[in-house]
Image (cartoon, helix red, strand yellow):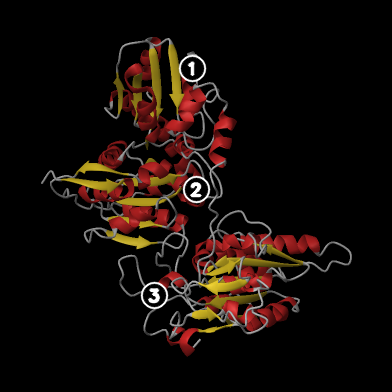
Amino acid sequence: MNEKVCLTGNEAIARGAYEAGVHFASAYPGTPSTEILESIAQYKEISSEWAPNEKVAAEAAIGASIAGARSIVSMKHVGVNVAADPLFTYAYTGVNGGMVIVSADEPGQHSSQNEQDNRNYARFMKIPLLEPADSQEAKDMIKIAFSVSEAFDTPVLIRMTTRVCHSKSIVKIGDAREVIDIKPYVKNAAKYVTVPSHARLMRKRAEERLQKLRDYAEETPLNFTQDHPGDVGVIASGICFQYAREVFGDSASYLKLGFTNPLPLSKIARFCERMKTIYIIEENDPYIEAAVRQLGFACHGKDFFPPYGEQTPDVLRKSLAGKSAPSAIRQAEQMPPRPPALCAGCPHRGLFYELGKLKNVVVSGDIGCYSLGFAPPYNAIDFNTCMGASLSMASGAQRVFDMLPGNERRVVGILGDSTFFHTGIPSLIETVYNGGRTVNIILDNRITGMTGHQENPGSGKRANGDPANVIDIEAVVRALGVRHVAPIDPNNLTLVKTTLEWALSLDEPSVIITRWPCALLKHMIPSDQAEFAGAFSSRYEVDPDACIGCKRCIGSGCPALTFDADTKKASIQSFQCMGCGVCGQICPVNAISVKDGGDA
């Protein structure tokens, strides 16, 4: 075959998994990793599934590996925090079928709540680490990773970053899928049952394995040099190698590291001995730099280049020109901002519009599209941390407020349907079990919205599009012991307002479930969901003669609404309007109505 195609790094990971004979893949969606599983699911030879969260995805892949299959699990960087518990232990036991973990890190925090360097996880878990610099390497390293996994009896971590995940480059794809038989499963309690007496021996074997991997790191062609005249050397890994080549060109020699745990210390030392000036270019932590300094070599790393954000060519050039890293960051921040906003017709808008008007209410938010509820015009979210934390944070905050004399503050926790399945259920259990009195709101928009409409346990479909059992959120909530549950249409502002007042009047936990599809699902509403019949079928318009220019409708934050400063009139861009009707309910003079007399 030997065909050349243009693939993103995520697509290349999927192609590599296919060519490597992978049998099983699991993931939880999260930018920039989402398209890995979506692409793998296109290969029918691989059993692929979305999991409720990253821990469960990792555990499913571990089970498949123990059963003898080659398995792969993918997630964004913060997802590894969730999956760390089983991964650390599987690093002790070793594998049966090869297992690869893909962590998609996000220097620059384009869509993440933090910026962490997951190379540290490989060192912490004592497992091999590979870092692709482009799509070709992403595909090739997946195949190499499975060979390493089975040769050294270990899971392998591949660190992707946003630019490698989403950038396209030419990839030479293999002739065919390797025929990899599922290995026989043999009962072996000493290997797979991690009671302390077994685990202590596993710990010793992990160190022995690490020494063998150190030898491999020195020999593997994944770590190589590119020599040019002069005594300037650059050491880089991943996408930073591409950035460095663009900035330094042939004026420097390079040590390109693709296998970075364990680091090839002897190869690094030999390279540094030949250089007068050494630059370490890496995103986030001084992972390589620390090793170079420990070897006794002076180098320029985080003293020249920013310790955070992407090390793009423009950042490198400014740093090398003598400007401080903060100056480079400030330069970037002077670009005209384009803040994110809830889409026109977003079912979260009506809730945040009413929630933001409440007094003495503190709102605990979560990770999803609805995080935007913190911003104007709603100003309706006070804090958030990680997925699934909103309800348990709300419970803790309410406990503290109730310790204060004369307290009137009430706490509301908010999260989405996919997030509820992810880690929100234990948070709600914590509230119910400990007798909390928070208002808990689940925003059920029928899909995993923020990451691009991946299926979840409440959407009725699996990763490959096959029908799936729908997990009924209301039934789950009631089964947990919540007595006060109210499913509502979030586009009905009067209903939203009265339901919030009802929930806040209670002295025990309540759950409000807002049920309306994501506006971007307008062409994908299942025909059997009669409650959403007619959704998105209407468009609204402003009667300019009736409009009084009060701008109350603009306060809804809907991007379909505009206001003309000259005419002092509002108008609706028909091509954006999704017919939710929120603006019409806000207008004090009934100047907004369904266009052409259609049904609302």
Which of the two marks, 3 or 1, is nearer to us in this view?
A: 1
Disc 3 to disc 2, C-alpha distance:
30 Å
Q: Is residue 91 left or right of residue 557?
A: left
Residue 110 - label: 2
Q: Earlier in the sequence, mark 3 or mark 1?
A: 1
Amino acid type, label 2: His
**Contact flag, marks 3 and 2 (Cβ < 8 Å):** no
Going by the numbered disc 3, the residue's amino acid type is: Gly
Work out whether 373 lies above or below 500.
above
Q: Secondary structure at mark 2?
A: loop
Q: Please provide percent x and percent y for residue 552.
A: 66, 73
* Mark 3 or 2, nearer chain start: 2
Q: Secondary structure at mark 1?
A: loop
* Residue that carries the numbered disc 1 in the rendered image: 299
Query: Is residue 474 positioned above or below 147 on the image?
Result: below
Which one is in front in this view, the residue at disc 1 or the one at disc 2? 2
User: Mark 3 = which residue?
Assistant: 460
Depth check: 133 or 595 in front? 595
Q: Residue at x 71, y 60 (%)?
A: 396
For label 2, the crowd category at 10 Å Cα-Cα, with few meaning under 14, some 14 to 19 and many 20 or more, is few
In terms of secondary structure, where does tag 3 sit? Answer: loop
Q: Residue at x 45, y 36 (%)?
A: 119
Query: Within the image, what quadrant is residue 211 found in?
Result: top left
Q: Give x and y (percent) for residue 144.
A: 26, 38
Q: Residue extending furthest left?
A: 1
Crowdedness near tag 3: few (<14), some (14–19) or many (≥20) residues, C-alpha within 10 Å: some
Q: Residue at x 52, y 64 (%)?
A: 419
Mark closer to the chain start, 1 or 2: 2
